[in-house]
Image: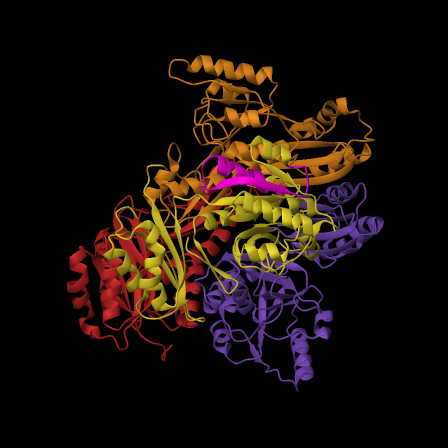
Chain colours: A red, B orange, C yellow, D purple
Amino acid sequence: MSTSKEHAIILMHCPDQQGIVAAVSRFIDENQGNVISLDQHVDGAMDRFFMRVSFEIDGFLVPKDKLKDYFDTLVAQRYDMTFELHFDSKAPRMALFVSKMSHCLYDILSRWQSGEWKVEIPMIISNHENLERVAKQFDIPYHYLPVTKENKKEVEAQQMALMKEYKCDFAVLARYMQIIPPAFIRQYPNRIINIHHSFLPAFVGAKPYHAAHDRGVKIIGATSHYVTEDLDAGPIIEQDVAKVSHKDEVADLIRKGKDLEKIVLSRAIRQHIMHKLIVFKNKTVIFD
Amino acid sequence: MSTSKEHAIILMHCPDQQGIVAAVSRFIDENQGNVISLDQHVDGAMDRFFMRVSFEIDGFLVPKDKLKDYFDTLVAQRYDMTFELHFDSKAPRMALFVSKMSHCLYDILSRWQSGEWKVEIPMIISNHENLERVAKQFDIPYHYLPVTKENKKEVEAQQMALMKEYKCDFAVLARYMQIIPPAFIRQYPNRIINIHHSFLPAFVGAKPYHAAHDRGVKIIGATSHYVTEDLDAGPIIEQDVAKVSHKDEVADLIRKGKDLEKIVLSRAIRQHIMHKLIVFKNKTVIFD
Amino acid sequence: MSTSKEHAIILMHCPDQQGIVAAVSRFIDENQGNVISLDQHVDGAMDRFFMRVSFEIDGFLVPKDKLKDYFDTLVAQRYDMTFELHFDSKAPRMALFVSKMSHCLYDILSRWQSGEWKVEIPMIISNHENLERVAKQFDIPYHYLPVTKENKKEVEAQQMALMKEYKCDFAVLARYMQIIPPAFIRQYPNRIINIHHSFLPAFVGAKPYHAAHDRGVKIIGATSHYVTEDLDAGPIIEQDVAKVSHKDEVADLIRKGKDLEKIVLSRAIRQHIMHKLIVFKNKTVIFD
Amino acid sequence: MSTSKEHAIILMHCPDQQGIVAAVSRFIDENQGNVISLDQHVDGAMDRFFMRVSFEIDGFLVPKDKLKDYFDTLVAQRYDMTFELHFDSKAPRMALFVSKMSHCLYDILSRWQSGEWKVEIPMIISNHENLERVAKQFDIPYHYLPVTKENKKEVEAQQMALMKEYKCDFAVLARYMQIIPPAFIRQYPNRIINIHHSFLPAFVGAKPYHAAHDRGVKIIGATSHYVTEDLDAGPIIEQDVAKVSHKDEVADLIRKGKDLEKIVLSRAIRQHIMHKLIVFKNKTVIFD
């Protein structure tokens, strides 16, 4: 990876209007940038334009540290555009929150260790001691912060302090069975990824596999989404499903669900790490 | 098909207890029946035993018209068993209820005409005139019974009279956009199959594709179920899903959903026609 | 549909180079066109750029009948581009070729009749008489041209004459169990769509379901592809699969496969009709 | 798990004939066994009967150590039956063979460590040193046995000696990129599970993702199968697939394929561990 070229990635959205693609591509072209990928989407109902473009910045005439400013002035402001600029040379720093179950944690750590993702994992936070041994296997600091009714505020402060101390860019709730407090969520908007063990919006809340079994569904699902202040109602990133039958007891749904959860969560993490997502009005546009 | 052998199919369920399989298989064996298929299921949580067995009745020592009585006395009563007896030589008679959309209707009629199913379709009922031309293409009587607030009771009576007149065994709501009244449902328990255009229990009620689009789901679904007095809450027979993305507008969800709906409904019809289903406590056991 | 606006669709590919998106979008923008969708793809291994763009032509400064010429001169030639121009106001004319099985034919005709596709179906050709009744149901001319070893050349000439007489733009082999002769294929390059009843490249040739059953696969598939002179080796448009088990006999694979075949073929037809496909080096780029 | 009851599992097959289910269920019933599950399958084309039955042996009148003998004499011999008897109290011992890639290995070890499977993993064999650190993370002996043209025979002998030394019941090739020699295979018939990174029988042999990319398929797959002396042609246990598109380069197919491979392999291992599989004539019957 060290020898591969560096790219700039711009994620943008604005009211739909004539000439945006031309303006963006002209900006890149005139400054000697080479477009690697360009995906756009127009949402007709909302009259909104979305675009992701990536280009090589080696040899680009605008210096890297001035790119944000120039793009803002020369393009974004003219089209009333909201945008994010990323460079793929920077590995985002991801905090992991877990409880007792290890399947998502192992899936994430094994991808990280094999180099599948360009990401750093500076620390793991948990309200249980169970998975400390897994953290040790991978040499990652593990912070055991048990949550009770009494200490909620305090733990919240500790968690947010750790996020800062470790310079985490975003957090992943890898089957962390606690509600994230609003102050934390507001600090990391569209930067906390959860995995819910049902096909949302079916079976919101606790014990979705029990609810699915009671209803007699023939398919179960898992949903990864950004955490918002509304429980299980944030923007959906990924979903997948598996067939089940009358033979499957609750324990079988839980077992089959684990495989869904880990794959769906890891796919969502990848989209986030690679800056393929735009969130707008509680929905995601994913340029995959 | 005319030369193939006739089979008896027994669907049964009872409290779980030792020796049921032995008793049923001994009954068939001692009377010279040849078991073609035998599937059983024990629901541990409910402590309930379910079984489907089919066997050739040619040469069976118990006469066909006494089989129900003998099985009842010699097996069913001893195990407190609920059972149904069917013969696959009899083609069930299926009434179709439609509104304006043709995709499910064509899918059903083309399977019927090509001989894929052993079923008779004596009539079609609709609250719109639109699909009369389709009924004519296949030479099936079409009864146009528009439903208004004022004539509901009357139409209900007409529909039930037609069901009797045509000796229909069961009804299929092939995107029939009307509520079936309780009296009708009680007359045909587990004999009215509906297709709901969502992945139940998500998006119960009207306009599920609009709701799915608003929520920003990444997968849509369709669900076939038996109609009960609780709207969209009857026993689920079949479900399937399709991936969607931010590119899909409501019209795309509707279009993609149609392919799901017709396939899911036709699979459910097949299970019903072939007597592969047992309904118990609002869930289905499907021996497929 | 009559009131919706007319769009131009340009499908193009050329050697990858800097500035293509800018050039194309500038051409549209400067002539007052409003881009509706723009999708591009760079194949790194082949160093090739692919793009599909659609824009409203109402009010476009270049007249419709000169658009091809202008785009060629002002854009395409400068980038060594191969391109196709389509207008979505024109319904392509599709010939259907069938043998004895009706499932794909019904699926196609019911979509056509319900207005799901903007397409005309001027005629059906078959080597059997079986499906003439289906053609009559939908009032479409049916040409029964039985193929024997002796009359192959003659039938081929008749088929090609009919294609011309009915002004067909492309042909769909809806389970037409005959080889299409090379001369026919060369006349309609990437304009003959076939459905093969296996997951290509597994089980090329005749009786794929028998071969799948012999091999004991756990999944079967269907593949739609453009017909080339190499049997079952043309560019793949769509594939889908279904789970099977040891319970499924060959007849079950055939039955389950029919549902795959009709859905996969119809999806491929839609992509073709809507000009979403570019074929290059025996592969398809699909901007869906 | 320690408090749950012990079960006997009998897997059997024989020529199809009248009365087998009755005979087996009578044997269990008369000896006070309680059937937990019973699945049977008749392969009509081969005229062969297959069955899996499990029952509680606590209180069974035939002593555990005589069960095999009694069943053989009283049932199996009379029906010309081939059968296997297992007790679920015994955890099978599984050897793992790996090369350089860690995704399947991590998936297996994390399931084992979380107690998802009742299995023991006494050792890992590899022809590379890369994954020794993973073995250390989980405290499992790691035998590095590099394979060259010259030492093949010797390594084969070492591997087989290790299998015996560690009392391994079966082996799993978790992306072990070497051919298993015939002598080894004959020692462990239907006891060596491989994962092939394609949808067999498509793309047999080396570099299947490259071949899939060349062919332009729209779906990739993975296949787990028992190893036989014919390369990639053994009985298929599990298969699954994932959609791909023109956007996916070979590296993307490899990445997406890894998720398929690990899930498909782990499902196959589970079926093997739980004795849900019967192999007959190079095909599997799976009672799941």
Residue B153 placed where, x, y %?
A: 44, 13
Above or below D101: residue D54:
above
Q: Which residues are magenta?
A: C104-131
Q: Residue at x 79, y 46 (%)?
A: D16
Q: Residue at x 25, y 49 (%)?
A: A48
* A145 vs A166: above or below: above
Residue D186, by quadrant, is: bottom right
Quadrant location, the N terminus of chain D: bottom right
Q: Tell me what residue is drawn at x 57 percent, y 38 percent.
A: C106
From the viewer's side, name the closer residue of A98 and D240: D240
Q: How many marks?
A: 0
Q: Is residue B150 left or right of residue C190?
A: left
Q: Is D36 colored magenta in this rendering? A: no
**In the rendered view, would you say D96 is above or below B247?**
below
Given residues D252 and D66, the one toward you in this image is D252
Tell me: D238 left or right of C249: left
Horizontal placement of B61 versus D287: left or right? Answer: right
Please say whether residue A29 is visible from this viewpoint. Answer: yes
Q: Residue furthest right?
A: D78
Up the image or down, A280 lies above or below D168; here it is above
The answer, for residue B16, to whether it is visible in the render is: no
**Picture coordinates of residue A103 (x, y %)?**
45, 60
Residue A241: image x %, image y %?
47, 49
- Magenta span includes C106: yes
Residue A167 location, x and y as percent?
A: 25, 69
